[in-house]
């Protein structure tokens, strides 16, 4: 699977981590844009935003807990 990034959609291959420069306000905007989507997972560290596509075996464990 290739990486696809558009204003409406982000598709990352399983196990991929995309690091973007950004601040807390950028992170909050991304959270609002993606809503309740669980993939990619979005994490904030000071100065950067991480978009994380979990491996398939990690996604299965989360769905079992829900």
Image (cartoon, helix red, strand yellow):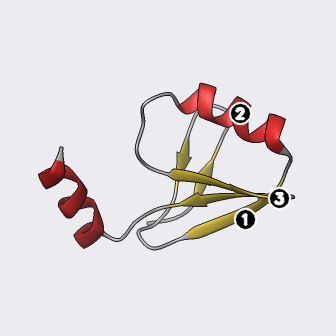
Q: Earlier in the sequence, mark 2 or mark 1?
A: 1
Q: Secondary structure at mark 2?
A: helix
Determine which residue is flagged by label 3.
Answer: 46
Residue shown at 51%/65% (left/top)? 2
Around disc 3, counting alpha carbons within 10 Å, would you say few (fewer than 14), some (14 to 19), or many (20 or more)? Answer: few
Is residue 23 positioned above or below 25 on the image? below
Q: Position of residue 29 (x, y in %)?
A: 72, 30
Q: CA distance from mark 2 to mark 1?
A: 16 Å
Q: Earlier in the sequence, mark 1 or mark 3?
A: 1
Residue shown at 56%/46% (left/top)? 10
Q: Secondary structure at mark 1?
A: strand
Q: Position of residue 42 (x, y in %)?
A: 58, 50
Residue shown at 16%/51% (left/top)? 65
Give me the disc on residue 19. 1
Using residue 37 as the reference point, say whether residue 52 is left or right of it.
right
Residues at badges 1 and 3 in contact (C-beta under 8 Å)? no
Q: CA distance from mark 2 to mark 3?
A: 13 Å
Determine which residue is flagged by label 2.
Answer: 28
Q: Secondary structure at mark 3?
A: loop
Residue shown at 40%/65% (left/top)? 54
Using residue 61 as the reference point, say whether residue 10 is left or right of it.
right
Using residue 22 as the reference point, say whether residue 61 is left or right of it.
left
Using residue 47 as the reference point, say whether residue 7 is left or right of it.
left
Q: Position of residue 12 (x, y in %)?
A: 51, 60
Could you tell me which quadrant the C terminus lies in? top left
């Amino acid at each position: 699977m290739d990486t696809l990034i558009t204003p409406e959609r982000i598709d990352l291959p399983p196990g991929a981590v995309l690091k973007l420069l950004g601040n807390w306000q950028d992170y909050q905007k991304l959270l609002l844009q993606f809503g309740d989507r669980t993939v990619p997972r979005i994490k904030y560290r000071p100065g950067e935003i991480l978009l994380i596509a979990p491996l398939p075996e990690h996604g299965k464990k989360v769905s079992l807990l829900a």
